[in-house]
Amino acid sequence: MNWSAVWDFWLYVDEPIGLILGVLIVLCLIRQNLWAWPLGVFYVFVSITVLLEAKLYANLALHVLGFLPLNLYGWYVWLFGGEQRDDLPVTRSRWTLLAFLAAICVVGGLALGFLFNTYTDAALPYLDNGIFMMSFGAMYLTAHKKIENWAIWFLVNVISVAVYVSQGLWFYGVLYFAYIFMAIWGFLEWRNSMDQQKQPSN
């Protein structure tokens, strides 16, 4: 087998495969479908070569060190995170948690941006690391079904469109452009879920 040809073919299809997986994952999250998490694990591995080729190293670190373990964590929490170790309900975050996450995102994004800018040839180190930190916080909130996750994802998606397009990753740019509208959809769907939880059962 010509492994060089196989590798070249993979580099040709990895980005569109990532686009398809990314859409499926968010659709599953909006519907609170457990399949979001195993698909998320697969998406991480697909994205490795995409991000390496684009020299988006912080984004790569986000996927491998952030998204991968958080997908496994979210999978567990959605299965066993409820009060009776059953399905987890959608809830709001405490302001203290949101303030804590915001502080971590600002400090971490600036510190990592400085390090990547100084010691690597990373493209857009500050924006890339800002995405890294905000996405990590959003994933944590998503895993715990905190409705505020969609607001953070909205901001992440807007910034990501600019980053991916500037690096010529048009498929991922289209994906994250679609994510902007899907974040709004997800917020509305989860808010409806919260309203239904508040209604007394007959």
Image (cartoon, grey):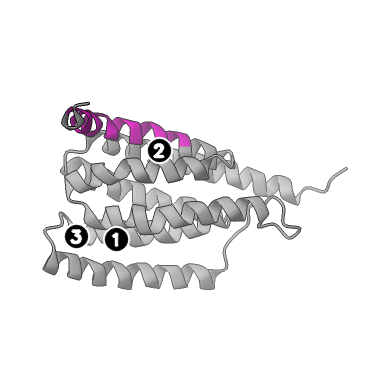
Give whichever of discs 1 and 3 has the lower sequence position.
3
Q: Is residue 24 above or below residue 67?
A: above
**Mark 1 Cα shell of 10 Å, populated few (<14), some (14-19), many (≥20):** many
Residue range highlighted in magenta: 5-24
Q: Amino acid at mark 3?
A: Pro
**What's the mark number on residue 31?**
none
Q: Measuring 41% from the left and 50% from the top, which residue is drawn there?
A: 153
Q: Secondary structure at mark 1?
A: helix
Label 3: state its secondary structure: helix
Per the model, the C-alpha gap separating discs 1 and 3 is 8 Å
Compared across the picture, whether 184 is left or right of 19 comes to: right
Name the residue tied to disc 3. 125
> What's the amino acid at mark 1?
Gly
Residue at (41% x, 68% y) in the render: 102
| Residue 162 appears in view | no
Foreground of the two, 178 or 17: 17
Q: Residue furthest right?
A: 202
Q: Residue at x 65, y 57 (%)?
A: 81
Q: Secondary structure at mark 2?
A: helix
Q: Which mark is residue 22?
A: 2
Left/right placement of residue 27 relative to residue 47 reads right
Q: Which residue is mark 1?
A: 130
Q: Nearer the viewer, residue 79 or 32?
A: 79
Residue lying at the far front of the rendered structure = 1
Classify 110 as above or below 167. Answer: below
